Image (spheres, rainbow, N blue to C red):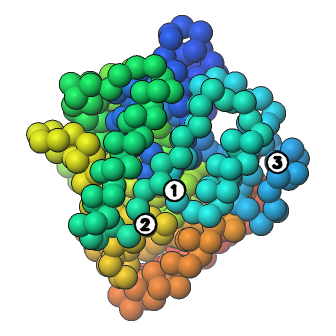
Amino acid sequence: MEALEKIKAIAQDPYSYALNLKKTTDKPVVGNFCSYTPEELVFAAGGVPFRLFGTKDDISLADAHLQAYCCSLVRGGLEDALKGNLSFLDGTVFPHTCDSIQRLSDIWRLNTGFAFHIDVVLPVKLDTQSARIYMIDVLNSFKSDLESALKNRITEEKLRQAIKLYNRLRQTLGEIYEMRSKDPDSISATDLYHVIKASMITDRDEFLELLTLLRDELKKKIKDRTLNTHKRIILSGGICNHPDIYTALEESGAEVIWDDLCTGTRYFEGDIEESGDPIEAIADRYMTRVVCPAKHLTVTARGESLVRLVKDRNASGVIFMFLKFCDPHAFDYPYLKKFLDDAGIPNILLEVEEQLPSDAQLKTRFETFVDMID
């Protein structure tokens, strides 16, 4: 599939893609570390939102600024910035999420030389009217900051067009996820990983064209009834930048048929209302989408959502996959595990860094888990 091969090439070498984009267009590239980045506003300002995933290289320079118990995403992102690997970035946006990202923002501002740096201090508790009012105020401030940084006025029409494009992107990503859930042989989990990664770094106009072509190609392949007998697994956690995990699972007799990841469904879950005030509509998506551990609805919202997801997707079990030293996910894990245990849903925890355990170790753990599942 030609579209898939182009998408994989971008996902496998995102920095080369970004450097080429800078050479061939005048679009500013705006880095971010989090799915709570209001990308519609960046796009409406003429920018290309670019998700940063850290580095797989050894970390040395960042250790002068961060403790070893910071997660590999934070340390790896700073390492790439200090080494000059992110020279294509015009600036960086830091949403208010975990403590490590917030402190990285301060260190980044003081030790890197990008043209602009914007903090977006979104509310933490999302189930009150006052939080919604505050969210709208923050988004309006972010709009003003972007206009100043990128020297480009964000008109209401530009913002409406951005919302429409992002809704189409989210809907098309959702369609492809649905195809894999229905027929895991239609597209491998590893290839879907490349699709979702590329969706966070590619110029969105360009990516929507590729994604639409891919969806249309997959529609010709999908079967009404899958012959795949692998155990159906859901991944839950923060980021996954490890295609090897999907391969090891498949070799162990399991298929990732859905996920609950920041670099997965939480990135595209929930459309934005296209009528009414666009800033308020963007705020409402962030107020109602499935939350990550750094945001809060009700006390049990995440547990209830995860159990419901397992049942809706006819999944056999859940693999929690957290970055080592990720405090928010570690705090939520005991109660999420209890929710799954009480519902009789098999689950295991896998803590990872940028350097994975050996293939043999991974496969042994996954095979043991698959054998546990009825």
Task: For marks 3 and 1, give the one nearer the viewer.
Answer: 1
* Pointers 3 and 1 in contact (C-beta within 8 Å): no
Query: Which amino acid lies under the numbered mark 2 shown in the image of this protein?
Result: Val
Reading the chain from its start, which is encountered first: label 2 or label 3? Answer: 3
> Residue 284's image quarter?
bottom left
Reading the chain from its start, which is encountered first: label 1 or label 2? Answer: 1
Q: Extreme top residue here?
A: 24
Pointer 3 local density, CA inside 10 Å: few below 14, some 14–19, many at least 20: many
Residue indicated by mark 3: 62
Residue under the point 39% across and 55% down: 266
The quarter of the picture where the N terminus appears is top left
Q: Is residue 210 found left or right of 236 in the rendered image?
A: left
Query: Which amino acid lies under the numbered mark 1 shown in the image of this protein?
Result: His
Q: CA distance from mark 3 to mark 1?
A: 21 Å
| Image coords of residue 283 (percent x, y) | 28, 51
Q: Secondary structure at mark 2?
A: loop
Residue indicated by mark 2: 124
Residue under the point 35% across and 87% down: 343
Residue 96's disc number: 1
Q: Secondary structure at mark 3?
A: helix
Question: Which of the two residues, 214 or 227, is positioned nearer the viewer here?
Answer: 214
The quarter of the picture where the C terminus appears is bottom left
Q: Is residue 156 found left or right of 352 in the rendered image?
A: left
Q: Extreme bottom residue here?
A: 342
Reading the chain from its start, which is encountered first: label 3 or label 1? Answer: 3
| Image coords of residue 167 (percent x, y) | 25, 38
Query: Which amino acid lies under the numbered mark 3 shown in the image of this protein?
Result: Ala
Q: CA distance from mark 2 to mark 3?
A: 28 Å
